[in-house]
Image (cartoon, rainbow, N blue to C red):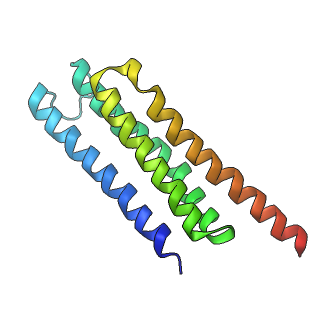
Amino acid sequence: MYHFTAIVTVLALLLYFYMSILVGQARGKFGIKAPATTGNAEFERVFRIHMNTLEWLPIFLPALWLFAIYVSDAIAALLGLAWIVGRAMYMTSYAKAAEKRGTGFGVQALAALALLVGALIAIVWRMLQG
């Protein structure tokens, strides 16, 4: 069973859900009517935080689960938590100013890369072992 990875998956999705709520609130606050996505710099940052997270979820989630299956549930969960922390850092810093988003982005990118590379190495290793 992959309980730790499952919990981290739910936490990541809850963070994404929270970001979607922030976009809705920002639409109201800044008067940006759907389907518009431009017109106010503060809204655009909130929107991009949400969209960038969506862009990363198809990289993060399969890598998280492949790592859990082929390497370790616990280690996958720890790397997944690092990804969530990175996304939260990205969210809070980017909401203040676009140029402040780098550290959070780097943390989540490194966590995702560790999951991807770790899963790939483990899959190939198992294939070669036979």
Against 25, residue 11 (above or below) is below
- The answer to whether residue 104 is above or below residue 66 is above
Q: Which of 15 and 23 is in front in this view?
A: 15
Residue most extreme to the bottom? 1
Place of residue 119 in the rendered image (x, y in percent of width and height, measured from the top left): 69, 59
Query: Camera-side residue: 60 or 3?
Result: 3
Residue 92 horizontal side relative to residue 125, left or right = left
Residue 75 screen position, x and y as percent: 58, 62
Residue 69, horizontal then vertical, whole percent: 63, 71
Left or right: residue 38 compared with residue 31: right
Position above or below: 67 against 22 = below
Considering depth in this image, is 22 or 118 the residue closer to the camera?
A: 118
Name the residue located 51 percent from the left edge and 62 percent from the top edge: 77
Give the residue at x 30% y 26%.
45
Q: Residue shown at 34%/29% (left/top)? A: 93
Q: In the drawing, does residue 8 fall left or right of residue 29?
A: right
Compared across the picture, whether 18 is left or right of 73 comes to left
Quadrant of image for the C terminus: bottom right
Residue sitting at 57 percent across and 62 percent down?
A: 76
Residue 5 on image: x %, y %: 49, 67
Choose between 85 and 22: the one closer to the eye.
85
Q: How many callouts does the rendering have?
A: 0
